[in-house]
Amino acid sequence: MLFKSIRKKKTTKRAFDVAFSLVFLIFGSPLLLFLMILVKLSSRGPVFYGSVRAGLHGKKIVCLKFRTMVDGADSLLENLLQKDPLLKKEWEENYKLKRDPRITKIGSFLRKTSLDELPQFLNVLVGDLSLVGPRPISFAEADLFIRKEGGKIFSVRPGLTGLWQTSGRSNLSYEKRIELEKKYIEKQSFLFDLFLIFKTIPVMIFPKGAF
């Protein structure tokens, strides 16, 4: 009975993911097209950026985003971290830079409002992501999560939104983020997912802690 209940919950969650993503991609296509044009006109480089992450069971996935940084940002990051010990320390602690010089002007707006992540509805549609779940982590972060929460993060699909994204985002410490991701995995349910989806809307309109 327990396994049947778990399987039913997973089936319901996946069905909702697919239906919601299809509806958004169809009716949100004018917005997506508009943002594609903005990104293309804002700076040289591709419209989309593929971010390699660890998915369900540690499987490699590529999360799509609108490009928010200058072209060649990955190699530029290596040079920045080599030249500036303080930036290197910040990156190693948070895997983010609060004042990242690689971000374009339109990219800054897209990040603050999380509009840069809208292409990830395609990731949800193909099953790499869920609408709600832990934030996708890089393989560089995986060891830290395994040490702190036993690798539970790999037992569920990463999410387009989740408890961390609606609870302060980058204003929170990395330790707090891990704690929130663990809390979501333990508490997850369809109603909790719906609550977090509705909570995401005002977070996008009135962004705090995003950079």
Image: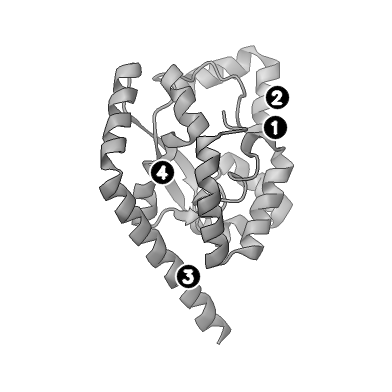
Cα separation, mark 2 vs mark 1, equals 6 Å
Answer few, some or many: residues within 10 Å of disc 3's Cα (few below 14, many 20 plus, some between 14 and 19).
some
User: Along the line of sight, which residue is nearer the eye, 153 or 133?
Assistant: 133
- Which amino acid does the dot numbered 3 rest on? Lys
In the rendered image, which residue does mark 2 sit on? 89
Where 133 sits versus 4, above or below?
above
- Quarter of the image that includes the C terminus: top right
Answer few, some or many: residues within 10 Å of disc 4's Cα (few below 14, many 20 plus, some between 14 and 19).
some
First of labels 3, 1 by sequence position: 3
Report the residue that reaches farthest toward the bottom. Answer: 1
Which residue is rendered at x = 55% and y = 34% of the image?
206
- Which amino acid does the dot numbered 2 rest on? Lys
Where 168 sits versus 22, above or below?
above
In the rendered image, which residue does mark 4 sit on? 62
In the rendered image, which residue does mark 1 sit on? 93
Cα separation, mark 3 vs mark 4, equals 22 Å
Which residue is rendered at x = 45% and y = 66% of the image?
13
- Which mark, residue 190? none
Q: Are marks 2 and 1 in contact (CB under 8 Å)?
A: yes
First of labels 3, 4 by sequence position: 3
